[in-house]
Image: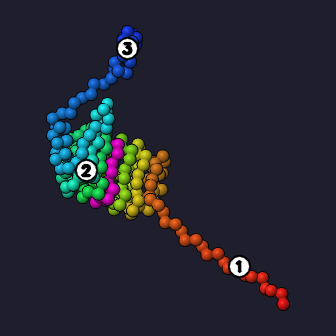
Amino acid sequence: MIRAAGLCLVLSGITCSLAFAEEKMPPTDAEKGAMAEIRKSGGQVMELAQNDSRLDVAFHLADGKIEDAQLAPLKSLPKLAQLNVRGKDITDAGLANIKDSKALVRLHLERTKVTDAGLDQLKGLENLEYLNLYGTAVSDAGLKSLEGLKKLKRVYLWETKVTDAGVAGLKTALPEIQIIRGVEPAKPAEAKPEEKKPEEKK
């Protein structure tokens, strides 16, 4: 540590963080092949930032049909950090392709065909922070699969089969989580009893 500190002092024009920055590893042949397959099917693949080689993969804007088969290349992308398959024909079987994606942080599954069985595939996503399940068939049973995801911060459950009891159970397991269930319908205002007019004196 002392020698490293001395080196940083000598290299006065270079900061310590730059001197010891981790070298950015280029994608492997398998990763290049997987990214090419995703783009061929209409998906988008890009790095999160110039100095962050983790990947953002999006299929929601693809013109062609996106089904479980199009997710197979994801198994070859260990740096997958964000995935968006909103509105596509993705089922529980398709999520098997990301069950080992330890780097995944954000996952958009809204308006897909995912059910409780699919959420069971997400148990190993230890770094997942954001999950959108709006418009899916998931229920209270599926939420139990999320209870071990300690980094999960936000879940969207609007128009699902989840009940108040299911939400309460997830909040007990993950006290810091924010659960969004959409705009609750306003309760009709109670009719006020008519006030009796005082009788006029004759």
Where, by quadrant of the figure, is residue 52 drawn? top left
Residue drawn at x 74%, y 82% is 197
Q: Is residue 134 above or below residue 188?
A: above
Determine the secondary structure under disc 2.
loop
Q: Which residue type carries mark 2?
A: Phe
- At 37% across and 58% down in the image, what residue appears? 134
Q: Is residue 115 magenta?
A: yes
Residue receiving disc 3: 13
Q: Decide: few, some or many residues near mark 2? Use Cα within 10 Å; few <14, some 14-19, many ≥20.
A: many
The stretch in magenta equals 104-117
With respect to residue 12, does 133 lie above or below? below
Overall secondary structure of the magenta section: loop
Q: Which mark is residue 59?
A: 2
Q: Can residue 149 be seen?
A: no
Residue assigned mark 1: 195
What is the x, y in percent for residue 64?
19, 55
Measured Cα–Cα span from mark 1 to mark 3 = 83 Å
Between discs 1 and 2, the one toward the N terminus:
2
